Image (tube, grey):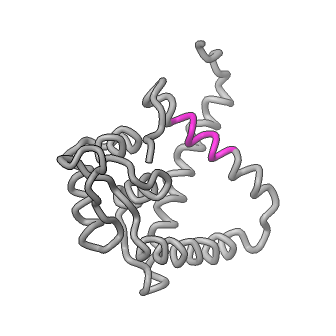
């Protein structure tokens, strides 16, 4: 199925959306320092950890596919996440030569703290006007899923 050509205003609005998303993500990432108990993670580490939290027990190969990272970049992120106590590698019960990735309780605690920082920062940035929030979250979730499908058509999420 081919998408219908966009009119110039829609083209501009979609490009503007991409710029706003990138800018907002950068600004939000800068806010982690507001809670010294939050373990600092790079954008790549957050992406990998989110994949592992969404799919506990996933394999490194499946995580690389879902995140779109090259195996070498994923391996580096996994090494750092393990050093920071955010993930653990467990032997694969079927194939002892392989291992499965699992988030740690420290990762869950860090996520709770991070979500609290993000909630406070976003609420302040929006000046407590949360109108349209649910629709925006739904749109952005649809966008994220659609972008993933475009990048890896026909592939399924990793099993855990």
User: In the rendered structure, does residue 145 fall within the stretch colored magenta?
Assistant: yes
The residue at the point 60 percent across, 13 percent down is: 1
In the figure, is residue 128 to the left or right of 141? right
Closest to the observer: 39 or 154? 154
Residue at left offset 68%, top offset 30%: 9
Q: Main secondary structure of the magenta part?
A: helix
Q: Nearer the viewer, residue 30 or 140?
A: 140
Residue 143: image x %, image y %?
A: 60, 40
Q: Residue furthest bottom?
A: 36
Give the vertical position of 148 relative to 5 (above or below). Answer: below
Q: What residue range appears in magenta?
A: 139-147
Which residue is located at x 70 percent, y 47 percent?
Answer: 138
Quick check: is 96 in the magenta stretch? no
**Looking at this view, is 9 or 18 the one in front?**
18
Image coords of residue 99 (percent x, y): 26, 52
Task: Point out residue 101 in the picture as x, y percentages from the top left corner.
Answer: 34, 56
Residue 21 position in % (x across, y down): 55, 51
Of 60 and 6, the residue lying toward us = 60
């Amino acid at each position: 199925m081919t998408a219908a050509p966009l009119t110039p205003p829609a083209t501009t609005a979609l490009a503007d959306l991409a710029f706003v998303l990138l800018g907002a993500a950068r600004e939000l990432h800068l806010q982690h320092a507001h809670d010294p108990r939050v373990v600092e993670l790079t954008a790549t580490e957050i992406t990998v950890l989110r994949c592992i939290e969404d799919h506990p027990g996933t394999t490194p190969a499946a995580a690389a596919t879902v995140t779109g990272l090259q195996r070498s970049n994923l391996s580096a992120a996994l090494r750092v996440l393990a050093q920071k106590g955010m993930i653990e590698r467990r032997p694969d019960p079927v194939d002892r030569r392989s291992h499965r990735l699992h988030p740690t309780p420290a990762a869950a605690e860090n996520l709770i703290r991070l979500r609290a920082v993000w909630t406070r920062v976003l609420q302040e940035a929006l000046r407590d006007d949360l109108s349209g929030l649910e629709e925006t979250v739904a749109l952005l979730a649809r966008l994220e899923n659609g972008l993933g499908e475009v990048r890896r058509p026909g592939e399924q999420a990793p099993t855990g």
